Amino acid sequence: MTGQISEAETAMILNTYMYTDYEYAEDGMTLGQIVGEMPSHIDTEGTYSPQYTILKEAVKDPETAALQISFQSKDMGYNEGTNAATFTSKDGEHVYVVYRGTADGEWMDNGEGLTVSETAQQAEALRYFDEVAVALSGSGIGRLVVSGHSKGANKAQYVTLASEHSGYIGACYSIDGQGMSERTIEEKKADLGNEEFKKRQDKLYGINGQNDYVSVLGCAVIPAAHILYVRTDAETTDFAAYHDITRMFASCEKDPDGTEKIVYHGRKNPYVFKRGILGDYVDELSKGLMDLEDDKLKGCASGAMQIPEAAFGGMPFGLDGSHAGLKDIRTFMFSGIPLIAGTLSGTGAGASFTRCLLENERFSHTFSEKDSTFIRYGQLREESEKLTEISEKLGDISEGILTESYKLSFYYDSVLIKESHIKLNTSAMLTQKKLIQKKAAILGDIIGMCEEFDSRSRSW
């Protein structure tokens, strides 16, 4: 492994650990010790092979290996959906509170998260965080980072906005995290006041897969300037992979015979400039969903979440017994499905998504490390300055020629030509000047965009 692992990437590694559903860690153990014992307790060659491969490589970094686990929610009386743990660096300077993604029985809670001000599982996550914060405050808290993936990320966002101990939080890293309901945002603004709400909001950062389809659901509370996208390689129809945190640590590579395979690494993939086609389409769909009347929004959300709740795991209902009723299913059929069809055919993002499906094209291009581009900003600036200088010289020459042309009159076959030919040519020169100026401005914008992107991604 090369290069220092940032706190954002550390949070991603810890979230990968949470998906091993490991039950054998004892408080005080280091991540290195836990990973070393994993093959004795879980299927590290099958079910949990991606997570184990990533973690085994990640703990080669001494600081990552030394992270110490504590406050495991499973040992503290919280329900199985809470699924949280806290990790502390060896020097005690960093504390990571991490929430796992959707557990069996939490799907209905996901749907409620689009409509109510606080769900039952958001409240549990808040209670866990406050208990940890109080316990740690006596001995002093270093930089506290709260994070999660998917539903866990939504919980992390909510805790940052809602906790009375939010002042301890230095940053919240939401990885593929669903947004909030309008009610949550409105109530938090009213409770906290705009200034305090903005202060907490500025602690939120989004790290999303390039074609993730969960992070675009609901109302965004994370500032747009605080969101970065990670390259995720997947086959077009492998939709689960686009929301799989392990794919943020994987690349699609080819065997000598041309067969593609997914290879997992201990470091996350590079950030990319923008969201992919699948993410853009679901963003359009989410906007349409959130514009529905409250009763239709609730029905669609509940009806849609009942499907994975019944399909995944052994619990057909939510942890609190919640489930979609016949009215919800009907609302999803008569409002949700037409909305899906409408966005597929009636939006540019929907058309691009459909074309990719029909033609079996990837929603985003895959790149190997050898395809990476290194930008030489100094050289680009020199080119931009040269273009600007050329455009200025063209302007000066054109003005000089026009000035002189007014002093001359030309006669050709007794026909007065005056300055028309010269004016025509100088007009063409001025057009070229504008084009060169535009190219210089575009190059300057590219430099600024790349520098800002590099600055943000390196600091994360």
Image (cartoon, helix red, strand yellow):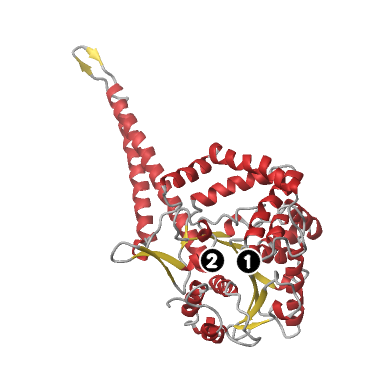
The answer to whether residue 18 is left or right of residue 449 is right
The CA span between labels 1 and 2 is 10 Å
In the picture shown, does residue 246 fall above or below 404?
below
Residue 256, horizontal then vertical, whole percent: 28, 66
* Dot 2 alpha-carbon crowd within 10 angstroms: few under 14, some 14 to 19, many 20 or more: many
The number of discs equals 2
| Residue 294 appears in the picture as rendered | no
Q: Residue at x 50, y 64 (%)?
A: 457
Residue 55, horizontal then vertical, whole percent: 51, 77
Residue to which mark 2 is pinned: 245
- Whether tag 1 and tag 2 are in contact, CB under 8 A, the answer is yes
In the picture shown, does residue 193 fall above or below 267?
above
Residue 254, quarter of picture? bottom left
Residue 117, quarter of picture? bottom right
Q: Which residue is drawn at 65% across and 44% down?
A: 336
The answer to whether residue 157 is left or right of residue 19 is right
Residue to which mark 1 is pinned: 101
**Foreground pick, 295 / 392:** 295
Residue 133, horizontal then vertical, whole percent: 74, 77
Residue 413, horizontal then vertical, whole percent: 18, 13
Q: What element carries label 2?
A: helix
